[in-house]
Amino acid sequence: MPNSRALVIGASGGVGAAVADELTKRGAGVTRLSRRADGLDLTDEACVAEAIGALDHSFDLVFVATGALTSTRAAPEKSLAELGAEELIAQVRLNALGPALVLKHLKPHIPRRERFVFAALSARVGSIGDNGLGGWYSYRTSKAALNSLLHGAAVELARTHRQAIVACLHPGTVATDFTEGYDRNKVGPKDAAASLIDVIEGLTPAQSGGFFDYAGRSIPW
């Protein structure tokens, strides 16, 4: 992506930092925003609007790498008996509404004729069709909601921004603080970032609104 401009939101996290570094390595000019470094709270629309409004140029790529596995609990729910409104609502606000609000406030700045990509980290567990294990109710639901919001936004954007691409991306299980304590085959953040950027570089407007894994394979809704 030489000479392109990228905005990475959540750039202080494991995946976000690695994506920003990978984009820089490939020659992109990268603007980094995060809650830790900049006080950006995606659950506060006024904060999102202020942060987006303060940006002084447009971007070719916006990558949202924010999210949390839990918000009010120590671990995801294992059963319906653990399900509660507080956790579910908090997860939807952060994992689904947050990225959608970023896109909402970016829309006036999206170029109408040039290629533009908006990508957000989703997760395979947000797939309803691929859910064979159950549990993790709030996290699963928040990611399914994110997928739905971004798919709908892609349909809307396609009417006026023919070169815009909106994508939900599953990075695999990445070795970060986010996945600490979960014994699964994990990939390092640098490798995950390189794979995700490869996928983004290969996407076309015809694939806008899709849900893809780190190898570019479609994931069922």
Image (tube, rainbow, N blue to C red):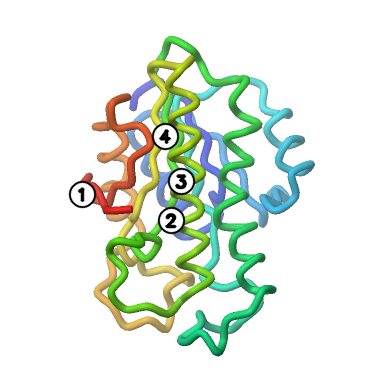
Q: Amino acid at mark 1?
A: Ala
The amino acid type, in three-letter code, at marker 2 is Val
Discs 2, 1 touching: Cβ within 8 Å: no
- Res. 74 image quadrant: bottom right
Q: Which amino acid type corresponds to the residue marked 4 in the rendered image?
A: Val
According to the picture, the residue beneath numbered tag 3 turns out to be 120
Question: Could you say whether the residue bearing mark 4 is in a helix, strand or loop?
Answer: strand
Which dot marks residue 15?
2
Where is 115 relative to 22, above or below? above
Whole-number angstrom distance, CA of label 4 to CA of label 2: 19 Å
Which numbered circle lies on residue 215?
Answer: 1
Tag of residue 166: 4
Label 2: element kind: helix
- Residue 66 appears at what percent x and percent y? 54, 54
Q: Quadrant of residue 56?
A: top right
Badge 2 or badge 1: first in the primary sequence? 2
Q: CA distance from mark 2 to mark 1?
A: 16 Å
